[in-house]
Image (spheres, helix red, strand yellow):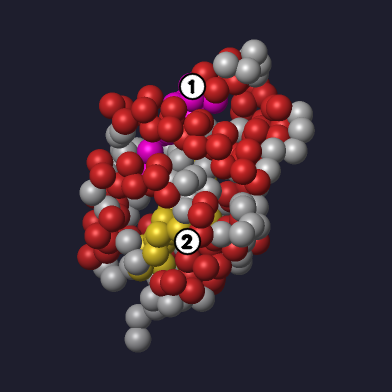
């Protein structure tokens, strides 16, 4: 019997290069509040982090409950407005996903972003019909680096964690996949190899990726 493999993708920086547009949205959001974080601060405290962490860090107080929801809506609406005209999948991902699907691989997406952002991207990147599990920030109690989103994705797909390969681009995301006991491919869209925990493989884009390469990771 052939081994069932599942591949789970993060979204920001993994399906699409969204991070520059998140930075733009946060800059606009913070400038309305007379704050101007540096690129270094964004690299350290934004990519791969949850909105509650980012907002609390830069506003220097705990942002939670109703206030968090309002601020999150404001920032994410800005992001969707800014990003919509530029949605473009990372090179090679759509053919790669088609290749995985035709080889019987189970597929999922697990993002810390809100469902509305994921829905926006899936209107332009034609992969939704291949996905057996779709998880956004509303579907979890604990955010990455906690493994909840990946363990739940594995359950949704009917596989064990050691049958899964995760594609991630951030420190907290790679950590979440490792904490879940899964293999990880580091997508170097916003960080260097040195800035991520050790991955099983590193890629710049998906042009060279194939089902065969995923099989070799097992």
Q: Please, is residue 182 above or below residue 136 in the view? A: below
Observer-nearest of 77 and 89? 77
Question: Is 49 on the left or on the right of 12, as rendered?
Answer: right
Q: Is residue 18 visible?
A: yes
Task: Give the image quarter of residue 36.
Answer: top right
Task: Give the image quarter of residue 129.
Answer: bottom left
Circles 2 and 1: CB distance less than 8 Å?
Answer: no
Which residue: 63% across, 18% down?
33
Q: Which residue is mark 1?
A: 24
Which residue: 67% across, 24% down?
41
Please state the total of marks drawn on the protein image: 2
Badge 2 local density, few (<14 within 10 Å), some, or many (20+)? many
What numbered label is drawn on residue 79? none
Question: Is 132 on the left or on the right of 190, as rendered?
Answer: left
* Callout 2: SS: strand
What numbered label is drawn on residue 165? 2
x and y percent of residue 31 in the render?
58, 15
Label 2 or label 1, whichever comes before in sequence order: 1
x and y percent of residue 39 in the render?
61, 19
Q: Which residues are magenta?
A: 15-26
* Callout 1: SS: helix
């Amino acid at each position: 019997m052939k081994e069932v493999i599942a591949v789970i993708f993060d979204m920001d920086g993994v399906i699409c290069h969204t991070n520059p547009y998140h930075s733009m949205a946060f800059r606009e959001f913070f400038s309305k509040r007379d704050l101007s974080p540096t690129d270094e601060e964004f690299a350290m405290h934004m990519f791969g982090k949850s909105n509650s962490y980012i907002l609390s860090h830069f506003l220097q107080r705990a942002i939670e409950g109703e206030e968090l929801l309002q601020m999150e809506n404001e920032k994410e609406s800005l992001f969707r407005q800014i990003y919509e005209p530029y949605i473009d999948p990372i090179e090679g991902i759509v053919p790669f996903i088609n290749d995985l699907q035709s080889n019987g691989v189970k597929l999922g997406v697990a993002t810390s972003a809100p469902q509305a952002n994921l829905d926006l991207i899936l209107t332009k990147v034609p992969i939704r019909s291949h996905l057996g599990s779709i998880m956004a920030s509303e579907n979890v109690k604990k955010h990455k680096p906690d493994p909840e989103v990946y363990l739940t994705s594995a359950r949704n797909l009917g596989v064990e964690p050691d049958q899964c390969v995760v594609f991630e681009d951030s420190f907290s995301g790679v950590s979440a996949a490792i904490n879940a006991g899964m293999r990880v491919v580091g997508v170097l869209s916003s960080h260097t190899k040195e800035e991520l925990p050790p991955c099983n493989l590193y890629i710049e884009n998906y042009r060279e990726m194939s089902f065969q390469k995923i099989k070799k990771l097992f």
